[in-house]
Image: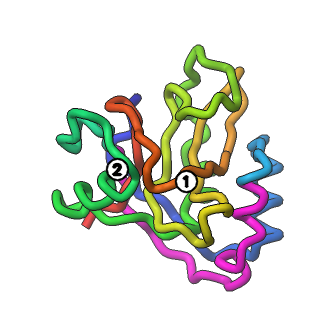
Amino acid sequence: MEFGIRQVAVGGLERAELMQYLAQSGVQLNGFAKQLLEHQIFDELVPAHNLTLTSRNLQQLGLDAGATLPQIFERAVSVGLKLCPAYAGPYLRLDFLDQAAFDDSVLSAGKKPAGSLTIASASVGDEDFPRGFYLRVVDEVAWLRGYRCDDTYGFALADTFVFRCR
């Protein structure tokens, strides 16, 4: 999946405006994404600014046996990457509407779907609250999805995360 390094404009929108842009762009949301978008992090208007983002799969991070989120985040920071702010997911979805679709059209199977991009960000709630956002395209429809997992869930080598560049 070609993501490269992207400059993404984030912030500057009230929650209602952000939701309107997502809807106008045809972005679909799962229940976890809707729950995240109702979180207080979207209550405050974040000033508009740019983030420089890049993607890495676990193998590119040197995690050859798969890893948990804490291990992935620790490794990423050790190689000079940073976590994204939790509010970055919807803005990246709007910026990356041309994400490639993969053959896997199952929307929820208890594992990370092929071709998806998980936004590497700190949790904003407890373990029962969605952990963060991921992006994928299913049947030519762009999705912003939320996900839940605990700190012991093992991600596979091909699983790809989006990080901030330093």
Cα distance between the residues tagged 2 and 1: 11 Å
Mark with earlier residue (2, 1): 2
Which of the numbered marks, if any, corresponds to residue 107? none
Q: Residue at x 70, y 73 (%)?
A: 13
x%, y% of residue 14?
Answer: 75, 76
- In the displayed structure, 85 sits above or below 74; it is below
Tell me if 91 is positioned left or right of 58 in this view.
Answer: right
- Residue, disc 1: 92
Q: Residue at x 47, y 59 (%)?
A: 8
Count residues near mark 2 (Cα–Cα under 10 Å), then give few for <14, some for 14-19, many for 20+. Answer: some
x%, y% of residue 140?
Answer: 69, 24
Tell me if 138 is positioned left or right of 153 in this view.
Answer: right
Which of the numbered marks, if any, corresponds to residue 54? 2
Give yes or no for residue 80 being in the magenta stretch.
no
Q: Which amino acid lies under the numbered mark 2 shown in the image of this protein?
A: Thr
Q: Residue at x 65, y 51 (%)?
A: 146
Check disc 1 and report its element: helix, strand or loop: helix
Check disc 2 and report its element: helix, strand or loop: strand
Tell me if 148 is positioned left or right of 4 in this view.
Answer: right
x%, y% of residue 2?
Answer: 38, 32
Residue 142 vs residue 58, the one in the foreground = 58
Q: Are marks 2 and 1 in contact (CB under 8 Å)?
A: no
Q: Residue at x 56, y 76 (%)?
A: 48
Quarter containing the N terminus: top left
Q: Which amino acid lies under the numbered mark 1 shown in the image of this protein?
A: Leu
In this picture, which residue range is highlighted in magenta? 33-55
- In the displayed structure, 29 sits above or below 139; it is below
Give yes or no for residue 53 being in the magenta stretch.
yes
Quarter containing the C terminus: bottom left
x%, y% of residue 9?
Answer: 52, 64
Query: Which residue, as the protein is rendered here, is positioned at the far top?
Result: 103
